[in-house]
Image (spheres, rainbow, N blue to C red):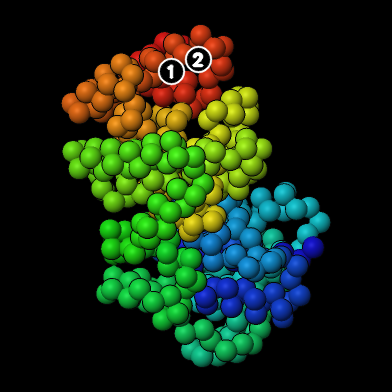
């Protein structure tokens, strides 16, 4: 198999990256192209570099509809810095017998021998580049000769330059541009950037379709469940106002948190397979999770709102995913959704009233109290505790 490897910060990934990969794939006859976001780039400083989770998710969104192109997380899973030679060595272990083609811009091609263990790197893959206007064929051929002298192979292809750059996109976003075509990114990538407040954007300014979310909750939920969802949304907004979180984002999470509660468990479990990292590994890899169908609806809803509604805001997605189980190290946003679900207005039993009173004074005290209730209930019913629940109980000092 002929596998192309395209690395970079992808901050953000843009249409030029896709065209570049497509051009290489076509001219070199590649079967597959892996997009490899760096964790910490060793060769350059990138100001305000978003977390790897954000950049990986943007790559996934940009690659939708491009068969043969795939995100590779190897450099995110290794300790920093990100060295290409280590990535290529790992790929050889993962795909024995494959031929690798390292896809570079002409500037990288001309300096690759100066990289970490550069002489070893060029023997692990064919080093490929594309002519650009500022580079003469002679410069590229001279570098190709140096690589060949070290036992490496090269390929120089010819194609028009792509007039788009991540630096320019970041600059335009900071200046207020919100037009995907003008920026040169896919609409889904722009939505992700804006919803998560990257590169000078503000999720508070995103045109959230509140009416659509409410209508969807009404359609998918039983009447009493819909009343609960709207009450959770109002409670989440109230707690957000009190504790300094985003009122509108907490409200949206409240509206959508039970959007998969009233679908069959089989459908819920099918949705879990569509979760994206890091949620997918954290939830699916817990062997006890599959034994507790009552908690599937949270992460199922997280997958549903991403895949079907284009809700990419990480606070909303994780708040919805963990609104029943909680987890160790919950963010303020997650705590608000977790507590709002337990203290919504229609809940009138004594424990809920007690939690509601506590939540008005101390969010963490309310969470600890709720975890004590959870422990008692699950012990009484002999329901297994998932790792997330065990870890959050330990974090709040509750002995299992």
Q: Do we see residue 389 in this rendering?
A: yes
Residue 400 percent coordinates (x, y)? 46, 11
Depth check, front residue: 119 or 277: 277
Figure quadrant of residue 225: top left
Depth check, front residue: 277 or 45: 277
Identify residue for label 2. Answer: 378
Q: Which residue is drawn at 45% across and 40% down?
A: 223
Q: In this view, does 305 lie to the left or right of 270?
A: left
* Label 2 environment density (alpha carbons within 10 Å; few <14, some 14–19, many ≥20): few
Q: Residue at x 53, y 86 (%)?
A: 161
Q: Residue at x 50, y 53 (%)?
A: 306
Q: In this view, does 164 lie to the left or right of 300?
A: left
Mark seen at residue 109: none
Depth check, front residue: 300 or 72: 300
Q: In this view, does 129 lie to the left or right of 16?
A: right
Identify residue for label 1. Answer: 374
Residue 146 percent coordinates (x, y)? 64, 75
Q: Marks 2/1: CA distance?
A: 6 Å
* As drawn, 56 above or below 380: below
Q: Do the residues bearing badges 2 and 1 touch, measured as CB atoms within 8 Å? A: yes
Q: How many marks overall?
A: 2
Residue 178 percent coordinates (x, y)? 35, 73
* Label 1 environment density (alpha carbons within 10 Å; few <14, some 14–19, many ≥20): some
Asked which secondary structure carries label 1, the reply is helix
Residue 252 percent coordinates (x, y)? 36, 49
Screen quadrant of the N terminus: bottom right
Q: In this view, does 190 lie to the left or right of 299?
A: left
Figure quadrant of residue 266: top right
Q: Outermost residue, front direction?
A: 223
Asked which secondary structure carries label 2, the reply is helix
* As drawn, 151 above or below 138: above
* As drawn, 362 above or below 43: above
């Amino acid at each position: 198999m002929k596998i192309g490897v395209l690395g970079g910060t992808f901050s953000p990934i843009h249409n030029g990256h896709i065209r570049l990969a497509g051009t290489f794939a076509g001219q070199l006859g590649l079967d597959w192209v892996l997009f490899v976001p760096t964790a910490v780039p060793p060769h350059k400083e990138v100001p305000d570099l978003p977390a790897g989770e954000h950049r990986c998710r943007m790559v996934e969104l940009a690659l939708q509809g491009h068969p043969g192109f795939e995100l590779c997380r190897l450099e995110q899973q290794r300790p920093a810095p990100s060295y290409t030679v280590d990535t290529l060595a790992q790929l050889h272990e993962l795909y024995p017998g494959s031929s690798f083609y390292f896809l570079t811009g002409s500037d990288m091609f001309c300096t690759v021998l100066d990289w970490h263990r550069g002489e070893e790197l060029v023997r692990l893959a064919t080093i490929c580049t594309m002519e650009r206007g500022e580079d003469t064929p002679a410069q590229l051929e001279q570098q190709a000769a140096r690589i060949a002298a070290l036992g490496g192979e090269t390929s120089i292809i010819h194609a028009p330059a792509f007039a788009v750059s991540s630096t320019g996109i970041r600059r335009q976003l900071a200046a207020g541009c919100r037009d995907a075509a003008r920026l040169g990114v896919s609409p889904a990538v722009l939505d992700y950037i804006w919803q998560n407040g990257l590169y000078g954007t503000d999720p508070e300014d995103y045109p959230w379709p509140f009416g659509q979310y409410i209508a969807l909750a009404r359609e998918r939920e039983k009447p009493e469940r819909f009343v609960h969802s709207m009450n959770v949304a109002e409670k989440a907004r109230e707690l957000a106002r009190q504790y300094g979180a985003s009122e509108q984002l907490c409200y949206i999470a409240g509206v959508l948190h039970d959007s998969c509660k009233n679908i069959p468990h089989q459908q819920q479990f099918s949705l879990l397979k569509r979760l994206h990292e890091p949620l997918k590994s954290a939830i699916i890899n817990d062997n006890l999770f599959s034994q507790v169908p009552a908690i599937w609806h949270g992460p199922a809803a997280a997958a549903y709102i991403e895949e079907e509604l284009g809700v990419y805001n990480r606070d909303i997605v994780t708040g919805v995913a963990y609104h029943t189980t909680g987890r160790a190290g919950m963010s303020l946003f997650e705590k608000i959704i977790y507590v709002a679900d337990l203290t919504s207005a229609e809940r009138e039993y004594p424990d809920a009233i007690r939690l509601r009173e506590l939540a008005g004074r101390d969010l963490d005290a309310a969470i600890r109290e709720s975890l004590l209730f959870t422990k008692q209930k699950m012990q009484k019913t002999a329901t297994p505790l998932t790792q997330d629940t065990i870890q959050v109980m330990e974090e709040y000092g509750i002995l299992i």
